Image (cartoon, rainbow, N blue to C red):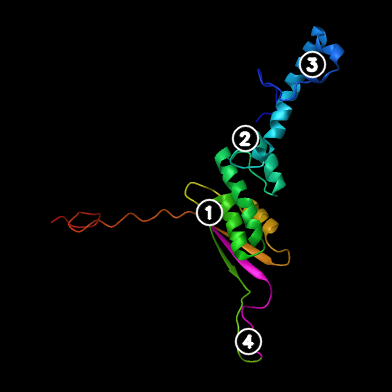
Amino acid sequence: MSRGLVPGLVSPHPMGDRLPAMYLEDSMVQRMMAALDEVLAPIFSSLDNLDAYLDPALAPDDFLQWLGGWVGMALEESWPPERQRAVLAAAVGLYRVRGTPGGLAGYLRLLTGANVEIEESGGTSYSQGAYPEAPGTPGFRMLVRVHEPEGVRLSQAQVEAMVSAAKPAHVWHQVQIVPFATPAPPLPAAGEEGEGQPAS
């Protein structure tokens, strides 16, 4: 797969062989056609491998941003190619659940690497009787709680923009970013001395 000149790449369709018979023995014309074949060979190679350009696992690194535009996923240029490929591979599947809390949580998880909780005002229920009480609360509201991964600082503005882009437009939302909490050190095992524990 290449979109540039590749020294030594042979064209599968040499132009010199397709000229009228009077040019087949003309060395100058054949050299000119050979130069054009060298320019066209990478184009034929790209077309022959087009399916690989559309596969996030195989596409060239510099093609990933463009591929992201196809699936409506803005990739950060600072991300390593492995992460960009993983995001692209999961992006299409998220469209099946777009507009749902699970879809939004998956979208944010994918882009930030954070654990996401969503509390919403809606609800569903069923009843065998007439006029049951409606579930949830009036209005369309949700709280999006994003737990920062270890060593990552998330921007409130960026997360707000991500939520606004992926949620239903009529739903009011609030974003809460929870800083990473360092886990407490494990308690000393039985018989071991710990801080504040008298030595025996």
Q: Which mark is residue 133?
A: 4
* Residue 30 pos. (x, y %): 79, 12
| Mark pair 4, 3: CA separation | 80 Å
* Residue 37 pos. (x, y %): 75, 20
- Quarter-wise, where is residue 62 in the image? top right
* Residue 57 pos. (x, y %): 58, 41
Q: Can residue 94 be seen by looking at this rendering?
A: yes
Task: Say which of 8 and 90 sits in front.
Answer: 8
Bin the neighbour count of mark 2 within 10 Å (Cα to Cα): few under 14, some 14-19, many 20 and up.
some
Which structural element holds mark 1?
A: loop
Disc 2 versus disc 3: nearer the observer: 3
Residue located 70% across and 32% down the image: 46
Bin the neighbour count of mark 1 within 10 Å (Cα to Cα): few under 14, some 14-19, many 20 and up.
many
Disc 4 versus disc 2: nearer the observer: 2
Q: Mark 2 points at which residue?
A: 61
What's drawn in magenta, residue-wise?
A: 131-147
